[in-house]
């Protein structure tokens, strides 16, 4: 008998000085809304703080202490016993049923979790793992300008927030324009930093930008464990915990979404029976009901149930074409569902080393330019690639930015690797 938990309703705290204090908002049917403070008490605050991984509840506040919200008021007369795992499990009048206005919006102050409590957040992206990048400095949240913003910077933010792999580094206020100070510009991360604040930049507030250039990121919120970057046991981020996705209803369409979200191309095989080992802690299975064309696992309703663990093997997000084997050829990269080429400006053996490692093709033998394996077609996704040679995927190397180049396909790069060492 399966034990099921709906997680399509999420909770967040807004307009506080950290992600562990603020106005309570819940996500229902794709829209964020507030909670009325009628009967709001410490039991509700305890549930919210626990759900967010924010430590103990300090205070349950009323009367829009953190400012009135907008949009729907989703919950009223909330009655928690404090043992619930999520606020949506507490009793209430029912979704959208209330006799309140936003002057009565409820709030929470939590003690905070030192491991997760920090100076970084993602805003207006629909989950805590996607959105506009905002940094806390001197008690005030501000944005990051997108000059030189790339996947190495995104990788640091995703790691700092515990949000899995970086899927995309977006620019030009993709998630809407922020307000207040622009704290960082010309951010340059190697990708190994523990926090964005450790990356190189001109200095706090030193910029020539406006909010139309606010940077954003999309993190996976999903990971593959005990295999490689593109194969392993499937786990998704729920609140502050990684939970195992299981094989009750996990199918090819679900696998396509996971592989796409991780930048791993198309699924090769979906297997069950804990082929990559059993996960630790709570083991859940996902009834995802994916169509297969969604861009992210968290962009559609999720129902989790207890079953055996599933795992997934995807192909990589880079391939070698027209070279006679899978370990030699023109370099092509998968971005936003479309394969494109790489321009030869600055292309060298460090870059080839990363490609060969990512494909499991042994050592790099040669890094080739000028369409040695023929000219490609479609977009030229990367130019001025600058890998150190230690990156685990070409997408994590520095470049001009997705689709930014001054090339044509006669400059398409290629790679020759020593051979297949892992299959």
Image (cartoon, rainbow, N blue to C red):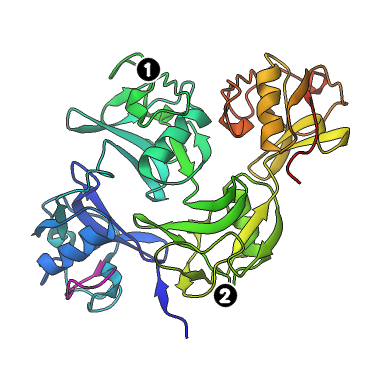
Q: Position of residue 56 (x, y in %)?
A: 15, 57
Above or below for 295 versus 340 = below
At label 1, counting other C-alpha atoms closer than 10 Å, the crowd grade (few under 14, some 14-19, many 20 or more) is some
Establish if 236 lies above or below 139.
below
Q: Quadrant of the rendered structure where residue 189 is?
A: top left
In the image, the segment drawn in magenta is 74-85
Q: Residues within 10 Å of mark 2 (few under 14, many from 20)?
A: many
Q: Main secondary structure of the magenta part?
A: loop
Residue furthest bottom as drawn: 1
Question: On screen, 276 above or below 202?
Answer: below
Upstream in sequence: badge 1 or badge 2: 1
**Residue positioned 21% across, 49% down in the render:** 20
Badges 1 and 2: C-beta atoms under 8 Å apart?
A: no
Q: Which mark is residue 103?
A: none
Identity of the residue drawn at 80% across and 23% down: 409
> In the rendered view, would you say 218 is above or below 314?
above
Left or right of 137, for residue 380: right
Residue 369 in picture, x, y percent from top left: 79, 17
* Residue that badge 1 annotates: 201
Would residue 267 be seen by someone viewing this image from the given angle? yes
* Mark 2: secondary structure: loop
- Cα distance in 3D space between marks 1 and 2: 47 Å
Q: Position of residue 16 (x, y in %)?
A: 18, 45
What number is the disc on residue 248? 2
- Asked if residue 86 lies in the magenta stretch, the reply is no
Q: Is residue 80 magenta?
A: yes
């Amino acid at each position: 008998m399966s034990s099921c938990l709906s997680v399509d309703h999420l909770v967040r705290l807004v307009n506080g000085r950290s992600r562990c204090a603020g106005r309570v908002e819940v996500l229902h049917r794709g829209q964020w809304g507030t909670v009325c403070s009628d009967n709001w008490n410490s039991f509700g605050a305890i549930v919210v703080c626990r759900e967010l991984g924010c430590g103990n509840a300090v205070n349950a506040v009323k009367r829009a202490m953190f400012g009135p919200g907008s949009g729907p008021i989703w919950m009223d007369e909330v009655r928690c016993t404090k043992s619930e795992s999520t606020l949506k499990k507490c009793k209430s009048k029912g979704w959208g049923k209330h006799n309140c206005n936003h002057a009565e919006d409820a709030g929470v102050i939590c003690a905070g979790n030192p491991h997760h409590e920090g100076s970084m957040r993602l805003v207006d992206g629909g989950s805590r793992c996607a959105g506009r990048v905002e940094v806390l400095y001197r008690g005030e949240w501000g944005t990051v300008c997108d000059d030189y913003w790339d996947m190495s910077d995104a990788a640091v933010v995703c790691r700092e927030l515990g949000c899995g792999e970086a899927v995309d580094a977006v620019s030009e206020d993709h998630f809407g324009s922020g307000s207040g100070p622009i704290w960082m510009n010309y951010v340059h991360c190697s990708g190994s930093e523990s926090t964005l604040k450790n990356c190189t930049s001109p200095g706090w507030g030193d910029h020539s930008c406006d909010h139309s250039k606010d940077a954003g990121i999309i993190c996976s919120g999903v990971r593959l464990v005990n295999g490689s970057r593109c194969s392993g046991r499937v786990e998704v981020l729920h609140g502050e915990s990684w939970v195992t996705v299981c094989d009750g209803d996990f199918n090819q369409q679900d696998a396509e979404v996971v592989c796409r979200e991780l930048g791993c191309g198309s699924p090769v095989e979906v297997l069950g029976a804990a082929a990559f080992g059993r996960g630790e802690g709570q083991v859940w299975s996902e009834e995802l009901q994916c169509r297969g064309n969604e861009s992210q696992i968290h962009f559609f309703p999720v129902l989790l149930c207890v079953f055996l663990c599933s795992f997934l093997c995807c192909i990589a997000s880079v391939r070698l074409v027209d070279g006679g084997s899978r370990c030699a050829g023109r370099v092509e990269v998968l971005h936003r569902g479309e394969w494109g080429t790489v321009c030869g400006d600055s292309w060298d053996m460090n870059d080839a080393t990363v490609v060969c490692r990512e494909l499991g093709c042994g050592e790099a033998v040669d890094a080739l330019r000028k369409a040695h394996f023929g000219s490609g077609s479609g977009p030229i996704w990367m130019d001025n690639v600058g890998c150190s040679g230690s990156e685990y995927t070409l997408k994590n190397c520095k470049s001009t930015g997705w689709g930014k180049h001054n090339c044509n396909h006669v400059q398409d790069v290629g790679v020759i690797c020593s051979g297949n060492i892992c299959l």
